[in-house]
């Protein structure tokens, strides 16, 4: 009977070890699942940051294009304003010259 008792003790010990292994594997699976969920959240956050970065870059490009356009418009306006101012001065000079002729003729 001693060998039956030894065999029973051995079987019980093995069953206990198997239960410990099952528990460890179950815990590992639970932790892996939890980590996968956290990684999914991390990936979503990275996607949002990437999208925001792309939008910011697009807005920066649009702002630069608008700045260049406004700078060109300002240069054209300065040129146009200068030409208009010269024409106005020329018209005023002619008007004064005409008045002076009238005065001299009188």
Image: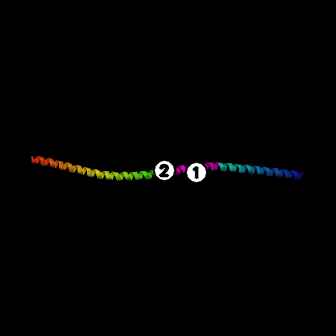
Reading the chain from its start, which is encountered first: label 2 or label 1? Answer: 1
**Residue located 63% across and 50% down the image:** 36
Residue 101: image x %, image y %? 12, 49
Instruction: Name the element at disc 2.
Output: helix
Relative to 18, is 71 on the left or the right? Answer: left
Please tell me whether residue 20 belongs to the stretch shown in magenta: no
Marks 2 and 1 in Cβ contact (< 8 Å):
no
**Could you tell me what secondary structure mostly forms the magenta stretch?**
helix
**Residue located 41% across and 53% down the image:** 65
Give the magenta-colored segment's residue range.
Answer: 34-51
Relative to 22, is 102 on the left or the right? Answer: left
Q: CA distance from mark 2 to mark 1?
A: 18 Å
Which residue is labeled 1 in the image?
A: 43
Residue 89: image x %, image y %? 22, 49
Q: Residues within 10 Å of mark 1 (few under 14, many from 20)?
A: few
Per the rendering, the mark at residue 55 is: 2
Comparing 42 with 9, the one in front is 42
Relative to 99, is 1 on the left or the right? Answer: right
Relative to 7, is 54 on the left or the right? Answer: left
Instruction: Name the element at disc 1.
Output: helix
């Amino acid at each position: 009977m001693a060998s039956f008792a030894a065999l029973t003790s051995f079987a019980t010990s093995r069953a206990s070890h198997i239960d410990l292994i099952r528990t460890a594997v179950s815990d590992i699976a639970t932790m892996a699942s939890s980590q996968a969920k956290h990684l999914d959240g991390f990936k979503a956050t990275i996607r949002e940051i990437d999208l925001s970065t792309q939008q910011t870059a697009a807005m920066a490009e649009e702002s630069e294009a608008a700045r260049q356009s406004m700078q060109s418009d300002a240069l054209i306006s300065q040129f146009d304003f200068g030409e208009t101012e010269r024409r106005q001065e020329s018209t005023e000079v002619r008007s004064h010259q005409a008045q002076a002729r009238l005065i001299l003729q009188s």
